[in-house]
Amino acid sequence: MAACETCGNDYDMSFEVHAQGAVHTFDSFQCAIQAMAPICEHCGARVIGHGVQVDRAWYCCAHCARQEGATGIVDRADAYV
């Protein structure tokens, strides 16, 4: 058993996440997301999907990036088959 670094729960099914040279222990994906997911610079939502990075700032979507002044950011590219 290992204690979750977010909530402290000592859980027999905890798991480790190895990221950027560090090892983190969590008891659930919810705690892992709370601890590790970036926060949108505009609306404050956790960026769980791909998100949008502009310079060193993270946004949950192109709309939020544009609201903060980013240009040329779109939600999806046109795909032609």
Image (spheres, rainbow, N blue to C red):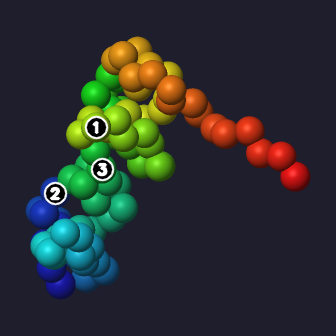
Q: Nearer the viewer, mark 3 or mark 1?
A: 1
- Closest to the observer, 26 or 18: 18
- Closest to the observer, 36 or 68: 68
Task: Name the residue tied to disc 2.
Answer: 6
Q: At x 15% / y 75%, what residue is drawn? A: 21
Q: Give the label on residue 55, or none.
A: 1
Nearer-N-terminus badge (3/2): 2
The quadrant of the rendering that contains the N terminus is bottom left
Q: Amino acid at mark 3?
A: Ala
Q: Amino acid at mark 2?
A: Thr
Residue 29 drawn above or below residue 58: below
Circle 1 SS class: loop
Q: Position of residue 34 (x, y in %)?
A: 26, 49
Q: In screen coordinates, is 29 left or right of 41?
A: right
- Cα separation, mark 2 vs mark 1, equals 28 Å
Residue 13, can we see it? yes
Q: In screen coordinates, is 63 left or right of 8?
A: right
